[in-house]
Image (cartoon, coloured by chain):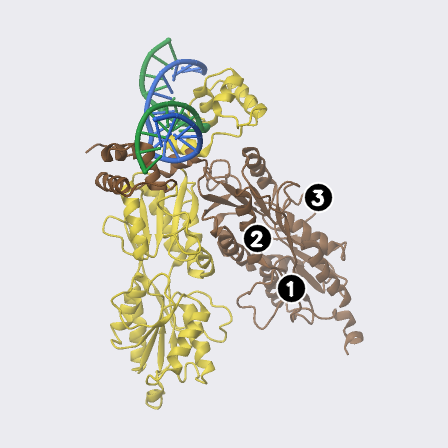
Chain colours: A brown, B yellow, C blue, D green
Amino acid sequence: MSTRRATISDVAREAGVSPSTASVVFSGKAPVSETTRVRVTEAAAALGYTGPDPRAASLRSGRSGIVGVVFEEHLGTAFLDPVQTLMMDGLADGVAELGAGLLLLRDAPHADAPRAATLTTAPVDAAVLIGCSGNLRESLAAVKARGIPVVVIEGDAGADVPRIGLDNREAQRQVASHLRSLGHERVAIAALPVRSGWRGAWLDDEIDIRIDVTRDRLAGARDVFSDAPVFAAAGSFIDEGLIAGRAIFSSAMPQVTAVIAQSDLLAAGVIRAAQESGLRVPEDVSVTGFDGIVVDGLAPFELTTLVQPATEKGRAAGRAVTAMLKGVPAASVNFTCEFREGNTTAAAPDERGARVD
Amino acid sequence: MSTRRATISDVAREAGVSPSTASVVFSGKAPVSETTRVRVTEAAAALGYTGPDPRAASLRSGRSGIVGVVFEEHLGTAFLDPVQTLMMDGLADGVAELGAGLLLLRDAPHADAPRAATLTTAPVDAAVLIGCSGNLRESLAAVKARGIPVVVIEGDAGADVPRIGLDNREAQRQVASHLRSLGHERVAIAALPVRSGWRGAWLDDEIDIRIDVTRDRLAGARDVFSDAPVFAAAGSFIDEGLIAGRAIFSSAMPQVTAVIAQSDLLAAGVIRAAQESGLRVPEDVSVTGFDGIVVDGLAPFELTTLVQPATEKGRAAGRAVTAMLKGVPAASVNFTCEFREGNTTAAAPDERGARVD
DNA sequence: TTGTACGCGTTATCAA
DNA sequence: TTGATAACGCGTACAA
């Protein structure tokens, strides 16, 4: 009874065959006679050998059967955000054909997990980057240098990296235009974080927005309301929306008649803040969201929002990765949001009288 | 420009040092003179070397920095179930200290993904099994043979495997007793699936329940209502609850006055089915859930249910795995549900008059 | 502080 | 159908 685990060579010796033959028995990559197969299988059982060591196999074959999914946040939040959840669902679908496992990774080592697994240290065959902040761009360089296929969801990683995109700017502009057509002039924006680790604050400097989604949606809003003040929240949560909303409604700024939130969850929080301030939605203030997810506890409100095909985005990413691993070049895909009018928007208060019909 | 990628030996040669020195520069496991460090770093940059190959490193060191999380369902559904989502959130937290990535795996190859990565073929340092059906038990044997630390959430894997458990049976019994004390006699049960791939049907044979959660909760209900008919759904979804509810309310069985659902989502579906049948909840029929999650669109109902600490369960599993990888034996942990009375249960119709106070 | 030498466990390749 | 050989790329005793 040796102290170390049995290897495939041990099994081969026990079965009286060569290591390569034993290997074939387990991989099934070449025909093996039934008698040999049985002998090897029995030898393995006798030695308690449960199959090739994945580490060694992946070193030799160059394949690990793992697709890395890189988030730029605390991993936990990836599960708490409905949009991400739906995307993961689609992604799991998309890589199913490939038969790979999904490895959840963070973009870079963080204070609370300094030795966290990252794209550079993980044995992945391909990677899917979600969002594409500055940190992610670093990972990207490493991965590209290693020649690992990469797909980016919601971000720009250069012309040679397939992206799964969304018409964030156009969609947000559409909603902004809708508000303008309702007569709104004094509009505030509740934005998503501008970079990893952002704490939630009024935004002074818009040059330094490092998260593409935030920047693109903001640009869309700015296409219509070029001077709207922006409070960038710490994350896409109802509670953060509440904080943003309080800042917006209680500030010394001129009374806003509409708030453009960059996510449905933020919008839900903003609505709550409005109610706290004694403002009626949509009579006193209109609020718009983004994503088109189901927000719990928002009844009787139905957000005026943009519905994005989150699951489809994930599925497309999975398919792109699958294709690339098969050597087929993958093309970028751009998805479109669908405008959905709810009951959280109405004509601006000032113009109410004139607009009622 | 060679056709293959640079290795650490190439870098060492370029820098004029030995491979082992170069290795140390990257791993930081031994002191290196500043000049050497710079020389190696520059050589690496010149050659486009981005660090040790994770595959080789993990073969050599025996560590991959990956914790496998094994589900017994289609991976996508894992993200759609709020309970799983919360658990993953906690799990991510729990392994954070370890700095490992979470690899999402299925229990066994499936029809739609025959070559899917499994516990046996993935380079994991440790594994967390969620649920513990028959399929999982197979993986379990292999993993134990390989000496990989394992923790099981909601399942029994033998005395030597730490389990993160829940008082499913006792909790469910508590709810059943509550119903009985309200005067209910004719009760039906809307159960979770009894095994992987189950399609949803009345349950004839209760011997063959291969999913522990289902069996334990059923046992709890049976402790009070020993003859209640059981419709086992295909999954924990509102739509499956609807199917179960329709079966229950439209069947030729004696009019039930209460339905014990094994999850909140099932309960939500059952309520919908009741309304379809013209039954009022809770006046005509009481419905109970399990999990204590927020079910969207259920307003104005608040389920009478059992609140389970899902996030805590995940966190405990993560901590157990972390401990085991450090060589510290981990103990099993058993969590307790909290009974929460909502407005979906009331006195049984027959006894209403007698019970009003 | 640096270098030498070896093996981690497997599988691709090719010849028999 | 099977076997011999040679890497895969790295980490780490140990010696210098």
Crowd rating for badge 1 (residues with CA inside 10 Å; few <14, some 14–19, many 20+): many
First reached walking from the N terminus: tag 2 or tag 1: 1
Evaluate whether residue A6 shows in this view.
Answer: no
Dividing the picture into quarters, in which one does residue B313 lie? bottom left
Instruction: Give the Cα distance between marks 2 and 3.
Output: 31 Å
- Residue B243's spot in the image, x, y percent? 42, 74
- Residue B114's spot in the image, x, y percent? 41, 51
Q: Are marks 3 and 1 in contact (CB under 8 Å)?
A: no
Tell me the residue that label 3 is attached to: A207
Q: For this rendering, which residue is in front, A242 or A266?
A: A266
Helix, strand or loop status at disc 3: loop
| Residue drawn at (23%, 42%) of the image | A42
Q: Return the mark for residue A316.
A: 2
Instruction: Give the Cα distance between marks 2 and 1.
Output: 23 Å
Tell me the residue that label 1 is attached to: A305
Q: Quadrant of the C terminus of chain A?
A: bottom right
| Residue drawn at (47%, 36%) of the image | A121
Q: Quadrant of the N terminus of chain A?
A: top left
